[in-house]
Amino acid sequence: MKFIVENLAIQFRQTKILEHVSLELEAGEIVGLVAPNGTGKTTLLKGIAGLLKLNSGFIWLEEDGHRIEQREAFLSRMFFVLSSDAFYENLSVLEHLQVVQKYWKSKISIEEASSFFGITYFHDKKIKELSLGMKQQLLLTLYLISDASLLLLDEPLNGLDPTNVRRFNELIQHFQEAGKMVLMSSHNLYNIKETCTRVCFLNEKKIIADIDVNEDLDAFYDRQYVTKVGK
């Protein structure tokens, strides 16, 4: 399985947000998407997920030499929740899990997925009763239970305590071993180093670098985005 973005461009009214963005992921790759706020990370993820119109470019999955680009077929293999704000306040945690399991036709059991992030004890709570941390635990559990081939995550560490950060790292390792493809935006370079296989840096409306995770990410970030005092 491969995921390919070719020459993607997105604009809002007359303002170009992204242009000439190309990217490719292979099965088992965990790719970090790094840039300061306002440079288009979330826009890129939303464009891939079909939540924003593309002004140009193509997006597809490739399986056994065949392109999967028809919308329904593509979306059935991809999973993305922008944030816990997208949850339905009056539905329970369990109901959210059941919806994802059903529509993504997942064979992963709710019990197995729930135990990973320790959310079984609040299955019956409605979303409006949850803390930010609990919502984030649910969000990551939904990614696990979806069993999708392509997983898009936007700042997934928000609201997680150290215990759940470790669980998140284990989840990413599980995805890699299972041959999933993960594209994950994050500001946390330390966690990117721990979890990703490659890192894409976004600036000036496009991907400016696609580098190995073992390179000096902090130094590269500083060169690209940090203005030195007195300069």
Image: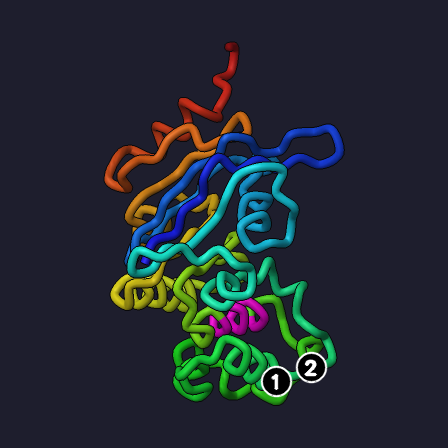
- Residue kind at label 1, given as amino acid type: Glu
Percent position of residue 33, x then y: 44, 43
Query: Which residue is the site of mark 1?
Result: 95
Residue 56 on the magenta span: no
Mark 2 residue type: Leu
Please give the name of the residue rendered at 47% of the width and 47% of the height, measured from the top-left corner: 186
Q: Are marks 2 and 1 in contact (CB under 8 Å)?
A: yes
In the image, is 32 to the left or to the right of 56? left
**What residue sits 40% from the left and 82% below the top?**
108
Residue 136 against residue 32 in the figure, above or below: below
Q: Residue at x 67, y 76 (%)?
A: 127
Q: Nearer the viewer, residue 4 or 150?
A: 4
Q: Which residues are magenta?
A: 134-142
- Which residue in the protein does label 2 denote? 91
| Farthest-out residue, top | 231
Q: Is residue 136 magenta?
A: yes
Give the Cα separation between the discs numbered 2 and 1: 6 Å
Residue 28: percent from left, percent from top: 28, 58
Q: At 29% from the left edge and 63% from the top edge, which residue is drawn? A: 179
Image: 53 above or below 160? above
Q: Residue 13, image x and y in percent? A: 75, 34
Assign the magenta stretch its main secondary structure.
helix
Looking at the rendered image, the quarter that the N terminus falls into is: bottom left
